[in-house]
Amino acid sequence: WLIHHEPVLSWSESMLGSLDDALAGSLSAWTDRVLPTAWSLPRIFAGLVSYTGALFDLSFPPLMLYASGRVRKCLLLLFALCFHLLNKIWFGLGVFPWLMMISLLLFLPQTEAAKK
């Protein structure tokens, strides 16, 4: 699925079309100027989203386990929360993003009272 950019590729055409409509056609005008004609914006977008999502999913647990400092962990948690919220907004993935946001509680740093 990662090599073929699925399932994002099946959604990217309508998603980018809606975004282009909201931007009054400026997205398609910009891509016509910038991208060679042989390139497909939905395929590029789907590849970018698929690979960055996989990179995030694979790197987040080690980063959280080995992050030093409360501030760094909280920033990583905030980034993860934004990632899952955007998944919910952009892709409408049902309950999965909410479960992942709740599971972020497992990575919260311990308070001093809990350590005693």
Image (cartoon, helix red, strand yellow):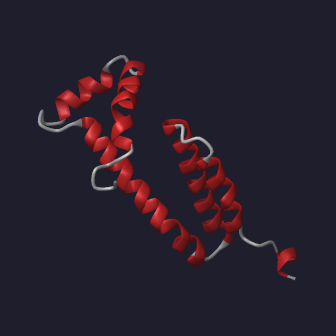
Report which quarter residue 53 is drawn in: bottom left
User: Residue at the location (13% across, 36% down)?
Assistant: 36
Q: Nearer the viewer, residue 31 or 93?
A: 93
User: Residue at the location (57% across, 49% down)?
Assistant: 84
Residue 60 percent location from the top left of the image: 52, 66
Report which quarter residue 67 is drawn in: bottom right
Q: Nearer the viewer, residue 61 or 73?
A: 61
Residue at the outermost bottom position: 116
Please state if 69 lies on the left or on the right of 56 as rendered.
right
User: Residue at the location (19% across, 28% down)?
Assistant: 32
Quadrant housing the N terminus: bottom left
Q: Looking at the image, is 50 positioned above or below residue 63? A: above
Residue 58 percent location from the top left of the image: 46, 66
Report which quarter residue 3 is drawn in: bottom left
Q: Looking at the image, is 41 positioned above or below residue 73? A: above
Please state if 46 lies on the left or on the right of 86 as rendered.
left
Residue at the outermost top position: 24
Q: Looking at the image, is 26 positioned above or below residue 7? A: above
Q: Nearer the viewer, residue 46 or 33?
A: 46
Q: Looking at the image, is 90 positioned above or below residue 71? A: above
Residue 45 percent location from the top left of the image: 32, 42
User: Residue at the location (40% across, 26% down)?
Assistant: 19
Please state if 99 lies on the left or on the right of 112 as rendered.
left
Residue 110 percent location from the top left of the image: 76, 73
Quadrant housing the C terminus: bottom right
